Amino acid sequence: MQQNRILRGDLPMDAQSATAVFAAKGIDVTPNKDQGVIKVVKHPGLDGERPMIGDRVTVHYSGKLLSGKKFDCSRDRKEPFCFNVGKGQVLRAWDIGVLSMQKGEVCTFLCKPDYAYGPAGNPNKIPPSSTVIFEMELLKFEGEMLTDDGGIVRRIKVKGDGYSNPNDGASVDVHLEGSCGGRLFDSRDVSFIVGEGEDKGVPLGVDRAMDKMQKGECCILYLKPKYGFGSEGKAEYKIGPDKDVVYEVTLKDFQRAKESWEMDLNEKLDLVVGVKHKGNQYFKAGRYYQALVQYQRIICWLEMECGTGREQQKRIQDFVLTAHLNLALCFLRIKEFSQVVENCNKVIELDENNEKALYRRGEARLLRNEFSLAMEDFQQVLQVNPSNRAARAQISNCQNKIKEHHEQDKKTYANMFQKFAERDAKVCKCTVLG
């Protein structure tokens, strides 16, 4: 009974006594086995896998000093705590301890200062060099989302070395194992340029994950169709349309590409020609996301460059304008209309009468149901080029849409007023009867 109270942190004790009690009942979960974090399971979790490095975990916890004084508790706040485990976002003891848990498990950790608050402690809460006790419950865990839309989820099996990652344009050597519905369809070593994985049959999601990986890392990537083989599927691998795929990826080695600040202007201008060509190839093949990467490289390299002499300045501006226009076209194809408007605005800032930018911005606004703004853009196109028949047709389209919109509004308001009138009539009738 007394041992249980000690394990809960309810009885005052010194660090040596606490270590002896926890060591007798629990296990040392530190990699070095130095008794820095000793775990005692209170309630076992569900049989199954444990969190992996980088997973988003949700826990409830309570922290106590060896004196028995509670200094923190998520349940008191009525709110669980979330973090990416193994990423240094929390105490070392938490990163180590949570990786040893299963979903639903409740356990107690005895944490030495080096794994908790260190020699400094935490002002007003934790005295210097304090051993502390945490009771934790692992509520749930899920992979780390690498994209805002949740289309690429990563789970790290083996952590990589160092702090360097491949950058855009880096050369990488990887081992891939792809599966769909539990069936292995791809297993190979492959080398490719980050941003150009499509050339080697590497899915967009694997390519996009490269700049988050470290040398030696082995991770599992869960890819939605958009980042796998899309609506076309992959006949070569017998994968149908709109299928989720899973890739286990090991980054064996990489060579970083030069960053923008490491290149002089002439070097950038020489490279831009090939990058633009690569982007155009991807666009023509319907690989719009891959094309975006290439056009964005041009913007990154040249947008802040001024150049020397009128000829070089014009060359830079031409590349930047074309890149923004091509980005707008890509975003139009993938229906990200706010990005279309943003890129067209960048062009119009430099060239207010740019026919393509005005037309593409009009298209995006029309598809966002901003009919009046779209019509203004198409009217400007006609001012620049009166013979643009497509713009004239779009103006007619906008006028029809505005008319349809007004008719719909009239019907909506008519129905609304009718309902109000019927309700008022019922109220009046009830008043008379009363």
Image (tube, rainbow, N blue to C red):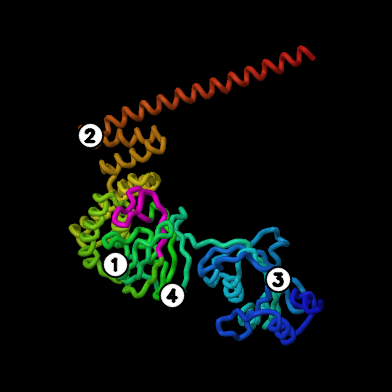
Residue 395: x and y in percent read 31, 30
Compute the Cα span from label 1 to label 3: 49 Å
> Nearer the observer, disc 1 or disc 3?
3
Q: Is residue 317 visible?
A: no
Query: Is 75 inside the magenta-drawn segment?
Result: no
Mark on residue 388? Answer: 2
- The quadrant the C terminus occupies is top right
- Residue located 23% across and 32% down the image: 389
Secondary element at image label 4: loop
> Nearer the observer, disc 2 or disc 4?
4
> Nearer the observer, disc 2 or disc 3?
3
The image quarter containing residue 69 is bottom right
- The quadrant the N terminus occupies is bottom right
Amino acid bearing label 4: Gly
Reading the chain from its start, which is encountered first: label 2 or label 3?
3
Q: Residues within 10 Å of mark 3 (few under 14, many from 20)?
A: some
| Residue located beneath label 3 in the image | 42
Compute the Cα span from label 2 to label 3: 75 Å
Q: Are marks 1 and 3 in contact (CB under 8 Å)?
A: no
On the picture, is 45 further left or further right than 212? right
| Residue located beneath label 4 in the image | 160
Reading the chain from its start, which is encountered first: label 1 or label 3?
3
Reading the chain from its start, which is encountered first: label 2 or label 1?
1
| Residue located beneath label 1 in the image | 192
Residues shaded magenta: 228-247
Residue 400: x and y in percent read 36, 26
Compute the Cα span from label 4 to label 1: 19 Å
